[in-house]
Image: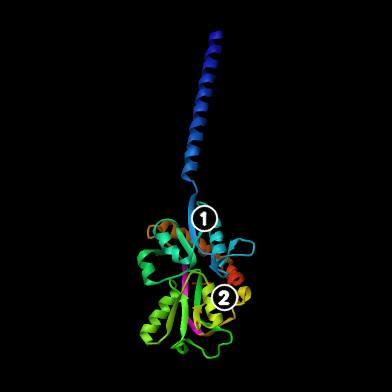
Amino acid sequence: MKKKMIVVITILAALLISACGTQETLNSSSNASNEDKKVQKIIVGTGTQFPNVCFIDEDGKLTGYDVELVRKIDEKLPEYEFEFKTMEFSNLLLSLETNKIDFIAHQMEVNQERQEKFLFNEEPYNIFPLHVTVHKDNNDIHSIKDLKGKKAIVSATSNSVVFLEKYNKENNAGIEIVYAGNGSDSTINQIKTGRADATITTPFSVDFSNDAVDAQQKVVGEPLLNSKVYFLLRKDETPLQKRIDEALVELKKEGVVSELSKKWLGADYTVNF
């Protein structure tokens, strides 16, 4: 009888040890699985001086259409954690090229130079309508054709300047292009004081500037461009590109992108296919 009891106890002990070993193995596997699912931090480059798109509000918070859209995309992608890094617009492309940021959210339009160096996502998130913009009391300029012999101030790294330089060359338009510094203040002040006659910008930017800083501007004529807007990534970031596009498609179907556009840009500038 004692021998039987000893055998039973021995078997139970062996089973207990085996179970502990199995549990340790499961815990180890679980930890390895958690490591595999580790959230990847993504640095998103944006600016602080684009009215209603990416700017610092009166409470000191970074917000705007592009910023809030990126936050909504982040909610859709549990494998990523997006973190914003703000800088001057002119520094964004170099920061992307040198791996200081992972993608750009700043109303990026397609042009040849950008396409050669970088990767755009495939799903556009709004249209960027560019208009000739003048002082509200200017009744001499009604379209781009009226800019001959006039000064047009545009950002040196924007699609506005690419368009204007090309238009000048192809049409012998005689527009004097003034290259603005970083930010919108110099453009607003130069048009307000008459040192520049016009700029090329969007209606939603004009509306915001008029309300926020009494820019005293108005848009004139038909849109010069209706460029589609995308996020800009490095060439090797196709997995991130794919996931951003998937999230954007979902957000469009849910009406989120449209509502953000109405809230921040004053109208629905989203692109639907």
Q: Nearer the viewer, residue 241 or 182?
A: 182
Disc 2 secondary structure class:
helix
Residue 9, image x and y in percent? Answer: 55, 16
Identity of the residue drawn at 51% across and 34% down: 27
Identity of the residue drawn at 50% across and 74% down: 127
What is the number of the mark on residue 204?
2
Q: Does the magenta stretch include residue 227?
A: yes
Residue that mark 1 sits on: 82
Work out whether 3 lies above or below 254.
above
What is the number of the mark on residue 203?
none
Q: Which of 248 and 273 is in front in this view?
A: 248
Amino acid carrying mark 1 in the image: Phe
Identity of the residue drawn at 44% across and 60% down: 241
Please report whichever mark, 2 or 1, sits nearer to the chain's N-terminal start.
Answer: 1
Is residue 130 among what the camera can see?
no
Q: Give the range drawn in magenta.
A: 222-230
**Neighbours of disc 1 within 10 Å: few (<14), some (14-19), many (20+):** some
Residue 156, image x and y in percent? Answer: 43, 73
- Residue closest to the far right: 59
Q: Nearer the viewer, residue 149 or 50?
A: 149
Q: Do the residues labelled 2 and 1 touch (CB within 8 Å)?
A: no
- Residue closest to the far top: 2
Amino acid carrying mark 2 in the image: Phe
Disc 1 secondary structure class:
strand
- Residue closest to the far left: 116
